[in-house]
Image: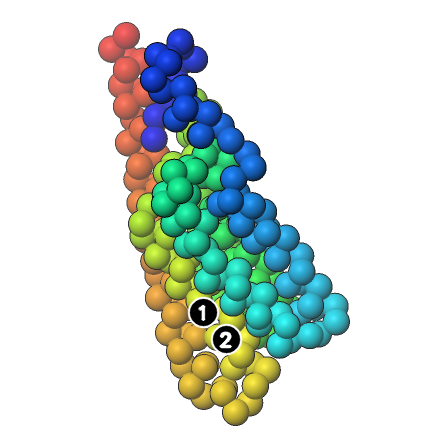
Amino acid sequence: MSRRPARVQQPQATGAAEQSEDRVLTLPNVISFVRLLGVPLFLYLFLVVRADVAAIVVLAVGGTSDWVDGWIARRLRQVSRLGELLDPLADRLYILATLVAFTAREVVPWQFTVALLAREMLLLGSLAVLRRHGYGPPPVHYVGKTATFLLLAAFPVLLLAAVVPAAAAVAGAVGWALAWWGLVFYWVAGALYVIQARRLVRAVRSQGVTA
């Protein structure tokens, strides 16, 4: 994570790579856009029409496709700046929307939701400090990606346990195991981001003192 460099003239050999990074209409970005559309669809199915089975399918597809856009971007060399923003945005919206919906229908206790939302507030505070010092969002850490994967895997399983009594025992045990581990990794990732932000801010201040 570094300050945005000033725009400079690049050699022609790197032009294709820069165009690839600036592209908007790529397959990975289309997948990310579709994932974003799945968030309001899930809320409508789960909270308005109470189509729980369909909501499970939307959650499962949204969660399992989390790694697809990144894998395709690397495979097809279609990594873009927009994609680097869309992927974590879609993940975060899925998690927040699902938490709100699950809490409203008592699929998860409010304490679990508060624990995850508190981590989001901590991260937002760190981002605000970084932006004030001229830095953008920190790169996604593998611990954070692991936490996201665990949570997105846990939610459809927990919903299955809530709406299918025959699967409640097994699905509930599996779902909560994934959810609690996801919560732990989510906070570990948040702590790592805060530590990284503090180091960057201290480096800026030390440079200002020595300048």
In this rendering, does residue 199 appear at all?
yes
Q: x, y percentage for residue 186?
A: 38, 55
- Name above or below for residue 198 compared with residue 33: above
Q: In percent of the image, x 45 and y 81: which residue is there? A: 172
Farthest residue to the bottom: give it: 166
- Badge 1 element: helix
Dot 1: few (<14), some (14–19), or many (≥20) neighbours within 10 Å?
many
One can see residue 131 in this view:
no
The amino acid type, in three-letter code, at marker 1 is Ala
Return the x and y of residue 129 as percentages of the image width and height. 44, 31
**Residue corresponding to mark 2:** 158
For label 1, the residue is: 154
Q: How many marks?
A: 2
Marks 2/1: CA–CA distance: 6 Å
Can you say which quadrant of the picture contains the N terminus? top left
Residue type at mark 2 is: Leu
Residue at 53% across, 79% down? 160
Q: Quadrant of residue 175?
A: bottom left
State yes or no: discs 2 and 1 in contact (Cβ < 8 Å). Answer: yes
Find residue 181 and report its horizontal and vertical position in percent: 35, 66
| Residue under the point 55% across and 75% down | 159
* Residue beneath the point at 53% across and 50% down: 31
